[in-house]
Image (cartoon, grey):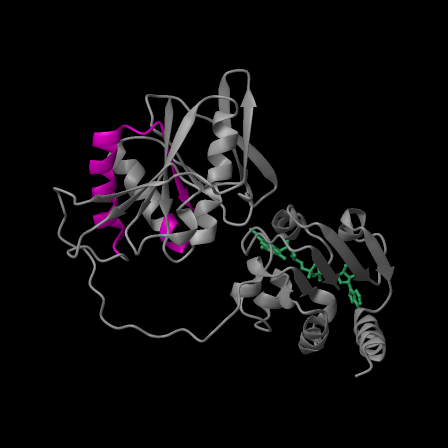
Amino acid sequence: MRRCLIYLDEKAPRDSVDLLEVARQIYADNAYETTGVTFGPKSVVAVGAFDTVIQVSISQIETYDPLAIAEVLVELQQIRAFDTILVPATPFGRMLAPRLAMRLNTGLVADVTAIRHEGDQLLAIRPAYSGRIMAAIEFVGDGPVMMSIRPGVFHWDRPTDKNTQTEIMTPANVCAGTMRRLAVKTKEQTYDIRESDVLVSGGGGMIGHFHELQRLAQTLGGQVSASRKIVDQGIAPRSIQVGQSGKTVSPKLYLALGINGAVQHVEGLRQVKNIISVNLNKNAPICSLSDIVVEGDAVTFIHKLVEKIEQEAGT
Ligand SMILES: Cc1cc2nc3c(=O)[nH]c(=O)nc-3n(C[C@H](O)[C@H](O)[C@H](O)COP(=O)(O)OP(=O)(O)OC[C@H]3O[C@@H](n4cnc5c(N)ncnc54)[C@H](O)[C@@H]3O)c2cc1C
């Protein structure tokens, strides 16, 4: 029986549980069991989805300290000898994964977006050279196989009716913290574009009119997102950027307004169900990926669509 450990990032429980889909694709038809490990409170979303959930109980460790957490995971690995260790490539996961790989003396494939099998060989796929190519990386050595997984690419939507065993781990070795929290600043309340079913997204063609997207998004019950062109101009925050250096999104509907469809942007759209693009140029790359293409001015499109929806709703 193969054993897979998944690090549960308390700040991104959904992204963490989604790594069960990666485990399923890695092991295909082979028998395997999954263990989730959390340093935060018991993860409600993990119960029923994992075979085992280990909750690490330690007051000496700060949950923002990747070195201290890596040290505990090394101890866990020495006891359980997992074949595979998966970490979500969240901001904290990106700090933790390389430190843990180094301590375990194993390789790490970072920011994986797909899993492939060639014969007996397991390949981890990730973007390389600024997303111009997808690199297939094979694992050599004794392992464990370690990957960090790009959030929003894999989705676990299978039944969560397992009789999950919950264990408490009290580590023997706790390394003295290398970080100290000086102050805590509360972030302004923002939304997460990865959780929205409808995204109204603006690009270079919306410069000067980006604020108009909000009204359409509100009318459709969705959220606003943006291409990097808009973010680089300081018109929208990086947190709503879609694409390779932004977020991978999976809405049911993605409205691409004045977006050309550069390869780095499209990289974030692979899980989108329906794309409608509005562009002055019907030969823009995004149009060939779209279910519906509207050739014309995006700003006029917004005004007409909002007007039509409001008329129909009688508002
Ligand atoms: C390492 C690296 C990482 C990157 N990561 C990302 C990323 O994560 N996300 C991302 O988006 N980009 C990313 N980029 C940038 C990417 O290459 C493109 O430069 C960017 O996506 C272009 O944005 P755009 O399509 O919105 O703008 P433009 O390229 O300016 O395209 C504007 C489009 O709007 C159309 N248009 C113009 N006016 C109107 C109008 N009035 N109505 C309708 N249509 C109109 C035009 O025909 C055109 O198709 C990255 C680049 C690099 C090198």
Task: Point out residue 13 in the picture as x, y percentages from the top left corner.
Answer: 42, 53
Whether 69 is among the magenta residues is: yes
Q: Residue at x 39, y 39 (%)?
A: 163
Compared to residue 45, the image places residue 31 above or below, namely above
Most frequent secondary structure within the magenta stretch: helix
Q: Quadrant of ligand 1?
A: bottom right
Classify residue 15 as left or right of residue 252.
Answer: left
Residue farthest bottom in this picture = 315
Q: Which residues are magenta?
A: 65-94
Q: Residue at x 58, y 36 (%)?
A: 134
Classify residue 232 as left or right of residue 175.
Answer: right
Query: Within the image, what quadrant is residue 254 found in?
Result: bottom right
Pick the residue in front: 166 or 300: 166
Count of picture labels: 0
Task: Point out residue 164 in the picture as x, y percentages from the top left corner.
Answer: 37, 40
Compared to residue 104, the image places residue 140 above or below, namely above
